[in-house]
Image (spheres, helix red, strand yellow):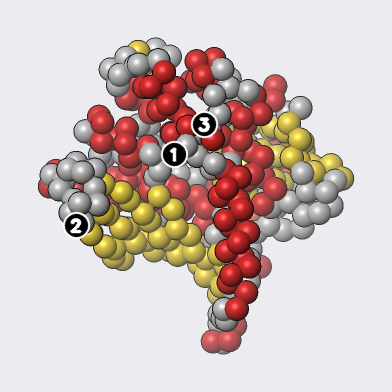
């Protein structure tokens, strides 16, 4: 099994992103600092006489929503929605500032709508970020009764000197921060393996717990941790869609490679179980799932202990999982 056979073609998405870059060349830049393809966009306000930088991101929850709808449990996907956005924002070096949400459905119980928003509020509280508005769109015939989709939009703020990534060089180290599980990626492949092939239901035991509990565990929000380690971070990487192979290169310059050491990653039974059940090649696992690491910080070797100690205080486990060598902007997993 692989992600493509379950309906998600990462390479096609990357081709589309490259096409978008070509199409937008005709548009005005209006203070744009970053290029399309990063975790978030950066806009400078110097034309307005201001030294502040705005960042922005938009994301959804993906087909994890189908699991929530199947379980009739909707109070965690709002946390996922916030997490997928604010975790992208902090990779730019800025802090999440305000958030908007979009909920679309055909016919949905009031209770489900309220639970979704409760989750959004919980996520924003963890992110120290405000909700300033959004859109609720009722669209008959687009969705079946009980189905819905979510999208989030976040704006962050920071100073020019805060922007990440900083220049990277050989000898810097990679510190990985634990994930809470699958987060919000790889669910099309998970559903194919768990439900379609192995015919599990949400009450089935999976690695010692009900499957629903494992699959609906909300994405970890790393904002408070980031604020405590910000002075020591040279680059920050959100391990989201595309896993390690597609996300780490987003921050690398052309002079370094990132070496990831497999034996230093946490041993997480749910990833091993899925790999065995789906007969998934190792390379595909590292391109689809976070493998127990939801965020990676790159720092000077002399600063790693400060980051590890801050991580302990935050209650999020950290692991020294790799280092930078001279190279051409590639990721190598050894």
Please identify the residue farthest to the left as the structure is shown. Answer: 110
Q: Quadrant of residue 111?
A: top left
Neighbor class of circle 2 (other Cα within 10 Å; few <14, some 14-19, many 20+) is: some
Residue 260 lies, with reference to residue 138, above or below; the image says above
Q: Earlier in the sequence, mark 1 or mark 2?
A: 2
Neighbor class of circle 3 (other Cα within 10 Å; few <14, some 14-19, many 20+) is: few
Q: Classify mark 3: helix, strand or loop.
A: helix
Q: Nearer the viewer, residue 110 or 158?
A: 110
Please identify the residue farthest to the right as the structure is shown. Answer: 326
Residue 158 lies, with reference to residue 219, above or below; the image says below
Q: Which mark is residue 116?
A: none
Q: Earlier in the sequence, mark 3 or mark 2?
A: 3
Q: Position of residue 27 (x, y in %)?
A: 57, 78
Say whether residue 167 is visible. Answer: yes
Separation of disc 1 and disc 2 at Cα? 24 Å
Q: Quadrant of the C terminus?
A: top right
Q: Which mark is residue 184?
A: 1
Q: Nearer the viewer, residue 66 or 57?
A: 66
Q: Position of residue 138 (x, y in %)?
A: 19, 57
Q: Which mark is residue 5?
A: 3
Q: Which one is in front in this view, the residue at disc 1 or the one at disc 3?
A: 3
Separation of disc 1 and disc 3 at Cα? 19 Å
Q: Position of residue 169 (x, y in %)?
A: 82, 50
Residue 243 lies, with reference to residue 202, above or below; the image says below
Separation of disc 3 and disc 2 at Cα? 32 Å
Say whether residue 162 is visible. Answer: no
Q: Classify mark 1: helix, strand or loop.
A: loop
Q: Which one is in front in this view, the residue at disc 1 or the one at disc 2?
A: 2
Q: Which mark is residue 138?
A: 2
């Amino acid at each position: 099994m692989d992600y493509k056979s379950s309906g998600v073609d990462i390479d096609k998405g990357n081709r589309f992103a490259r096409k978008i870059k070509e199409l937008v060349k005709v548009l005005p830049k209006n203070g744009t600092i970053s290029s399309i393809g990063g975790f978030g966009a950066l806009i400078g306000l110097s034309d307005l006489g201001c030294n502040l930088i705005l960042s922005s991101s938009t994301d959804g929850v993906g087909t994890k929503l189908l699991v929530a709808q199947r379980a009739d449990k909707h109070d965690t996907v709002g946390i996922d929605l916030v997490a997928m956005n604010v975790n992208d924002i902090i990779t730019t070096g800025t802090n999440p500032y305000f958030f908007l949400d979009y909920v679309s459905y055909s016919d949905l119980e009031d209770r489900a709508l309220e639970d979704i928003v409760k989750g959004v509020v919980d996520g924003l509280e963890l992110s120290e970020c405000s909700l300033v508005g959004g859109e609720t769109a009722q669209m008959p015939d687009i969705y079946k009764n009980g189905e819905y989709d979510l999208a989030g939009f976040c704006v962050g703020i920071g100073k020019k000197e805060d922007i990440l990534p900083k220049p990277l060089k050989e000898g810097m180290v990679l510190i990985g921060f634990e994930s809470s599980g699958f987060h919000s990626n790889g669910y099309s492949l998970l559903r194919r393996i768990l439900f379609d092939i192995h015919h599990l239901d949400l009450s089935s035991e999976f690695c010692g717990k009900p499957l629903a509990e494992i699959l609906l565990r909300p994405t970890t929000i790393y904002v408070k941790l980031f604020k405590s380690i910000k002075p020591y971070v040279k680059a920050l990487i959100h391990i989201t869609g595309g896993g390690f192979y597609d996300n780490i290169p987003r921050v690398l310059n052309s002079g370094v490679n990132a070496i990831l050491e497999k034996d230093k990653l946490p041993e997480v039974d749910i990833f091993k179980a899925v790999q065995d059940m789906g007969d998934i090649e190792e390379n595909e696992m590292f391109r689809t799932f976070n493998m127990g690491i939801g965020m990676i910080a790159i720092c000077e070797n002399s600063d790693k202990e400060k980051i590890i100690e801050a991580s302990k205080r935050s209650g999020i486990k950290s692991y020294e999982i790799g280092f930078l060598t001279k190279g051409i902007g590639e990721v190598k997993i050894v």
